[in-house]
């Protein structure tokens, strides 16, 4: 048996393994959105740090995200739609400001407020 052949095979699989490993990292980094940061930047002013509406938010009619009843009757699609389109004179639309990935990530932030 040719030992050099075995060695070459082993090092080739190491290289291929390393390449998939590193490309895997760069893929996950590209979609690694800091949803909490997005929320704190764009939503906190009205919806508050914990999903409890601020005076401004309450004045406009924002709801308590920690409310179990609201969480139960609201679908992820409704949350996504609300963030995309907003409500005239109450909440501005975010579809031009945020990517769809960021908006989807915000759903889990909003859901997180319901888990107490
Ligand atoms: C200018 C204040 C303001 C900002 C900023 C704001 N919202 Fe709102 N949001 C509101 C108000 C007011 C309502 C209630 C609208 C209504 O009754 O139709 C609302 C409603 C919602 C709802 C739906 C509530 C329901 O009952 O269906 C969600 C979800 C939501 N906002 C998420 C967000 C997220 C996420 C952000 C940040 C990207 C954000 N909002 C930024 C004021 C704001």
Image: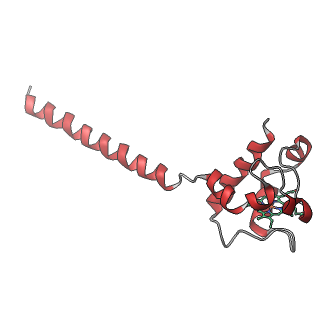
Q: How many marks?
A: 0
Horizontal side of 29 relative to 40 (left or right) equals left
| Residue 88 spot, x, y in % from top left | 86, 74
- Assign the C terminus to one quadrant of the image: top right
| Residue 17 spot, x, y in % from top left | 31, 40
Determine the image quadrant of residue 54: bottom right
> Regarding ligand 1, which quadrant of the image does it lie in?
bottom right
Horizontal side of 34 relative to 115 (left or right) equals left
> How are the residues colored?
secondary structure
Determine the image quadrant of residue 72: top right
| Residue 94 spot, x, y in % from top left | 71, 68
27 to 72, vertically: above or below: below
- Assign the N terminus to one quadrant of the image: top left
Quick one: 91 or 50, which is closer to the camera? 50
99 to 51, vertically: above or below: below
Tell me which residue sits at (69%, 63%) in the image. 42
Horizontal side of 4 relative to 99 (left or right) equals left
Quick one: 50 or 28, which is closer to the camera? 50
95 to 75, vertically: above or below: below
Quick one: 39 or 17, which is closer to the camera? 39
113 to 40, vertically: above or below: above
Tell me which residue sits at (65%, 51%) in the image. 36
Tell me which residue sits at (72%, 52%) in the image. 107
| Residue 23 spot, x, y in % from top left | 38, 50
Tell me which residue sits at (65%, 70%) in the image. 97
Q: Which residue lies furthest to the top in this view?
A: 1
């Amino acid at each position: 048996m040719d030992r050099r052949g075995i060695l070459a095979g082993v090092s080739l699989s190491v290289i291929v393994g390393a390449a998939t490993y590193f490309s895997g990292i760069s893929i996950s980094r590209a979609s690694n959105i800091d949803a909490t940061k997005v929320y704190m930047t764009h939503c906190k002013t009205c919806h508050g740090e914990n999903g409890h509406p601020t005076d401004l938010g309450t004045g406009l009619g924002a709801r308590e995200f920690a409310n179990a009843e609201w969480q139960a009757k609201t679908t992820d699609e409704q949350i996504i739609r609300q963030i995309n389109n907003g409500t005239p004179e109450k909440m501005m639309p975010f579809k031009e400001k945020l990517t769809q990935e960021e908006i989807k990530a915000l759903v889990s932030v909003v859901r997180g407020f319901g888990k107490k």
